[in-house]
Amino acid sequence: MLFDWKKSILIALFVVLFVPALNLQSQNEARCGEMQQIQLMHPPKEGECQRVRCAMRVRGHLLVNSADTSKETRLPLQVHGTLEYHELLLDQSAQRSARHYDQTQVTITVGSRTNRSTLPDDQSCVGCQFVDGQIEWVSAGRPLSEQERDLIDLQGNSLLLPQLIPDRLTRGQTWPVDKRLAGALLGVDTSIDCTLVAHLVSADSRTAIIEITGRLMGGVDGVRTEIDLEGKLTVDMSSRSVRSLELNIDEKRAVSDGQPGLDVAAHLYLELAPAEVPQSLGEDRIAVLRDLASGLSPGFLRFESELLGVRLLHSKDWKVVLSRYDVAVLRQLESGELIANMTINSLPNSPPTKQLAMSSFQSEIEKSLAKFSGQMLEATESKNENDVRVLRVTAAGAIEKVSLYWIYYHLSDASGRRASVVISVESDKIERFAAGERSLIATWKFVPRADRPEKTARRNDDE
């Protein structure tokens, strides 16, 4: 067969001219695949339910100021916790949900002392809402106590996870995490500087993985906080929903007048899966939570001590720092600064027919004021919403050249139950205090008192 030089030339031309073009087209198609926008999440729907399992571990130190020195004391801290709950979306914006907690077990060890906490069964149904950059909680039962709220108000709130992901993304895309959303996700009240960045690392027909890294600086109760974060968010592409969240958190929080500081490393893992609505989130409870959430106010917390036999409601700026059989101490803080100190003391019961006269109460106060060059200013008598008799006396004086304002209360009911309350405020903070104790006294109620703990009784007898 003769050599077909014309055919050879045509083949050579095809190789030179068309094969590179085909390769270039394949490369362009690959690039288009990479640039193709992907929808990771389906739009949230009211009534969707998911089951969430959470495991957390915290190790580091609790920082406190020593009472007798200006030095900072570092106390070893360990926290282990597991939580499980069903979460039901209450609206399409994914801003509100109802939860039923099936399990809450948290163990906190500070130094050599260990405390184990669980959520009471009658407080297991709660509402969670993202409002104005803050997470708010409501309960279908009694108002939550500070301890109950802290038990469930964890970093990595599952309600917020869909809001971390834009509607459409391309593979390899990065985007900044909204500062207020980052603050709510990491438990920071005020976000000052946020460098958190999310990155869609990979996505296929089964799974998409998003990494979140960076630093958040802000404040918790007005106290400076720095958080370094490394996190991974996994999305199930078949259900278009978040499957898991893993967070590694390094947090440093300064010490304040009323709260200890932190220097800790935390690991948190959330596992999420679509679920049927459990009977525990029945229509009656959902209706209650919906009503509560739609009219949500700056929520009040419950302080209840069976040891003291007292229940009251307080705003979030009051922190419980001590609660024993004979005394409780609450502090009002503003931006981490101490505004007022409240001391509650139980008093022996009196005969129901014998009540303390206002004149006798004033005489007792007058004696205590003598050593402080103090003077009484005003005295009033009233009853609160629970039919508790309230004697209130205000006074002013000075201790070691510091001008102080005091409010004295004597509270009693028809059964003879009695208690005293003393609030102290530095005079230059009176306007900021703004009679902040009145809402606490207005909701004061005497409740059955538990028996005196044996250890407490022995300790006090020895003293």
Image: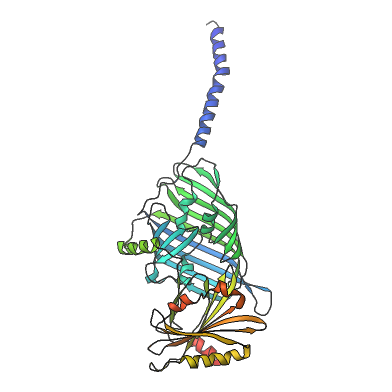
For the rendered model, the colour scheme is rainbow
Q: In which quarter of the image is the C terminus?
A: bottom right
Answer with left or right where residue 288 lies relative to residue 191: left
Q: Which residue lies furthest to the front in this view?
A: 377
Question: Is 410 drawn above or below residue 110 in the view shown?
Answer: below
Q: Which residue lies furthest to the right in this view?
A: 70
Along the line of sight, the residue nearer the viewer: 154 or 94: 94
Along the line of sight, the residue nearer the viewer: 5 or 280: 280
Question: Is 396 drawn above or below residue 277 in the view shown?
Answer: below
Whether residue 31 is visible to the viewer of this picture, yes or no, is yes
Spot occupied by residue 120 in the image (x, y as percentages of width and height): 40, 72
Question: Is 2 drawn above or below residue 294 in the view shown?
Answer: above
Along the line of sight, the residue nearer the viewer: 77 or 420: 420
Q: Residue furthest top?
A: 2
Spot occupied by residue 285 in the image (x, y as percentages of width and height): 33, 64
Whether residue 452 is visible to the viewer of this picture, yes or no, is no
Q: How many marks?
A: 0
Spot occupied by residue 448 in the image (x, y as percentages of width and height): 39, 84
Spot occupied by residue 95 in the image (x, y as percentages of width and height): 43, 55
Question: Is 394 drawn above or below residue 289 in the view shown?
Answer: below
